Amino acid sequence: AARVAEAAGPDLIDINFGCPVRKIAGRGAGSGMMRDVPKMVEMARRIVEAVRLPVTVKTRLGWDEDSKNIVEIAERLQDAGIAALTIHGRTRAQMYRGEADWTLIGEVKRNPRMRIPIVGNGDIDSGEKAAEVFERYGVDGVMIGRATYGRPWIFREIRQFLSTGVPMKQPSVRERVELAKLHLAKSLEFKGEKVGVLEMRRHLSCYFKGLPDFKATRLKLVTLTDPGQIVATLDEIARVWGDYDASEIVPKPLSHEV
């Protein structure tokens, strides 16, 4: 599988030992691999040997509260030859509930045996939060997941804060509409109409969180199936709410339901 992926010309091969979804982890894949560490390490080693590209891993703190063994796992994966490690600050049992625990991520980073880059993941939803974890835990990078929903500019937002210390002005409603339309067009281009529309629903419902009296319009965004009608609804949002102060659109705290 790694060789097939390598033939497509990626920059690296990333092994996802972090997925907590029941149908994946329950059969021993994804974060389910954390219950069989020798197999996890052997799989990483075999993949490193099979390809010429750098091989990286993403995983979690452990399977559950009683088995947070990421410090040991990190050392063993490094010894297997991986080039970098991303750690999500929750156990598999937590799924996405509660706050991410970055203390063990920091412990892995401070481990004198570790030589590879350590990337932290979990609840990074602002430039201020990114700056805090860089300063407090010394990670080499941060990975952002759910905070991108309806907010694809978050990467620019974080880069600006890290370089200047000044928060970025949030996009206006009209700018959000144009971004959402571009996002929809790209989704249709890559996924086709049916899947492209279905996958966009979770994003479209997040672009405009915080707008007043928006419930009926949000319901349309997550139920329409015709791309033309979705675009017309987005244009209607720009017409009705275009002058609304975008600073009032406060990002909703991350949740598994997003």
Image (cartoon, grey):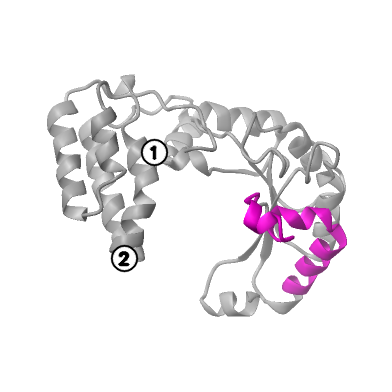
Residue 96: x %, y % from top left: 61, 38
Looking at numbered disc 2 in the image, what kind of residue is underneath it?
Gly
**Can the viewer see residue 181 in this picture?**
yes
Instruction: Tell me, yes or no, whether the highlighted magenta stretch contains residue 202.
Output: no
Instruction: Name the residue carrying label 2.
Output: 192
Q: Main secondary structure of the magenta part?
A: helix
- Can residue 172 be seen here? no
User: Residue 232 got which mark?
Assistant: none
Q: Is residue 190 left or right of residue 20?
A: left
Tell me what residue is drawn at x 61 percent, y 27 percent.
132
Q: Nearer the viewer, residue 151 or 29?
A: 29
**Which residue lies at the image location 56% right of the left edge and 67% below the top edge?**
11
Q: Quadrant of residue 104?
A: top right
Judge the density around disc 1: few (<14), some (14-19), many (≥20) Cα neighbours within 10 Å: many
Q: Which mark is residue 151?
A: 1
What stretch of residues is rendered in magenta? 19-48
Front residue of 148 and 170:
148
Frontmost residue, 60 versus 79 = 60
Residue at the far left: name it.
239
Q: Tag 2: Cα neighbours inside 10 Å, few (<14), some, or many (≥20)?
A: few
SS category of the residue bearing label 1: loop
- Residue 23 included in the magenta stretch of the image: yes
Please state if 157 lies on the left or on the right of 46 as rendered.
left
- Image quadrant of residue 179? top left
Q: Nearer the viewer, residue 49 or 234?
A: 234
Q: Is residue 21 above or below residue 133?
A: below
> Which amino acid does the dot numbered 1 rest on?
Arg
Horizontal and vertical percent for residue 62? 78, 45
Mark closer to the chain start, 1 or 2: 1
